[in-house]
Amino acid sequence: MKALVTGAAGFVGSGISRRLLGDGHQVVGIDALTSYYAEQLKRRNLQDLEGESFAFHEADINDIDLDALLDGVDVIYHQAGQPGVRSSWGQEFESYARNNVLATQRLLEAAARNGGLSKFVYASSSSIYGDAERFPTTESDLPRPVSPYGVTKLAGEHLVSLYGTNFGVPTISLRYFTVYGPGQRPDMAFTRFVQAALSDREIRIFGTGEQIRDFTYIDDVVEANVLAGHADTARPGEVVNISGGSNISVNEVLDVLGGLVGNALNVQYLERSRGDVFRTGGSSDLAADVIGWKSRTSIEKGLARQLEWARETIDVWSSLPENTV
């Protein structure tokens, strides 16, 4: 199999690429290496992927010749996009519209011209639910995003479903619930927590810490993508939750981390950020039915693995500016 992985230098994209290469597949990777976080971290991810079976393109999806890029590709794993809830307001919104909506539409157009494609897997987000009506939230519940980021991810998801139903592109969208684990982006909570804990720095929490999250371990998310890429789904445009089922408050996460580190954590609580929801929590029953997936990693085991990874790579993190993490 030959796969295209967009955002191949990122957290999830590099994980998928690594898994596919390990399974003996060919991988074409593309990443624009934007300045959202330190490029050296993305370059480090790419070092793990080097080899004859991996071809990398440093390019923007909006600019590159996609027909040539998709030549011979069987499966697309579309992970590229502009992340981050807090930074999606104001003037930065243009990059979200370009990278999350326009790039997705352009890739779908190329996919529609590629008659040999067997699956188009899109990385959606639980942010599309906003303040959900009920928990666990199901795919049939009304999406009500409360951040510009969530709006763009939902727009991308709608495009993916439209190209599935109107043009027969074999699409499926995976709604990720907060992905964590080794290699997590430096702006995300668990990376900030473990790096601060290991260096005895202040851990800053936006809100009271009582907000509840459904965290999903990276290996489980990678497995969901692999299964989705091979699944014989009943209808194009399918949408499924990929949720770890943790349903744990941020303060409880800090308790677990404190126990793993063996030290009291220095925590400061700040004003709640615009666009942050109080609770996330998804049902993965449909994912079990459609692609045969379920979460296998507990929050305690997953956080311990991320802490171990952070200790092993402390030399990399210590060389970065403090505000990077």
Image (cartoon, rainbow, N blue to C red):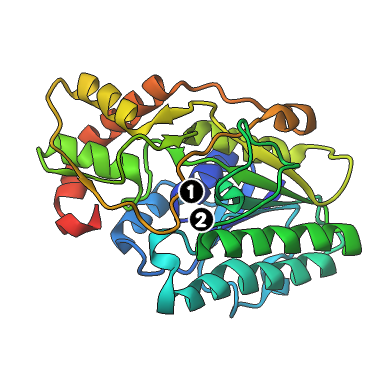
Picture residue at 21% right of the left edge, 33% below the top? 311
Q: Where is residue 307, by image quadrant? A: top left
119 sits to left or right of 66:
right
Camera-nearest residue between 96 and 1: 96
Q: Residues within 10 Å of mark 1 (few under 14, many from 20)?
A: many
Is 114 drawn above or below residue 161 in the view shown?
below
Residue 154 sits in quarter: bottom right
Residue underneath mark 1: 14
Q: Is residue 306 visible?
A: yes
- On screen, 156 above or below 295? below
- The residue to which callout 2 is attached is 8
Q: Mark 2–mark 1 contact, CB under 8 Å?
A: yes
Q: Where residue 268 sits: x, y (%)?
A: 17, 43
Observer able to see residue 72 = no
Question: Residue at left 57%, top 55%?
Answer: 79
Q: Is residue 243 left or right of residue 311?
A: right
On residue 322, which mark appears? Answer: none
- Sequence-wise, the earlier of marks 2 and 1 is 2
Dot 2: what SS? loop
Which residue shows up at 26% across the image and 24% down it? Answer: 255
Give coordinates of residue 121: x percent, y percent: 69, 50
Residue that protrudes farthest toward the left in the picture? 200
Amino acid type of the residue tagged 1 in the rendering: Ser
Q: Amino acid under label 2?
A: Ala
Q: Residues within 10 Å of mark 2 (few under 14, many from 20)?
A: many
Q: Which one is in front, 9 or 86?
A: 86
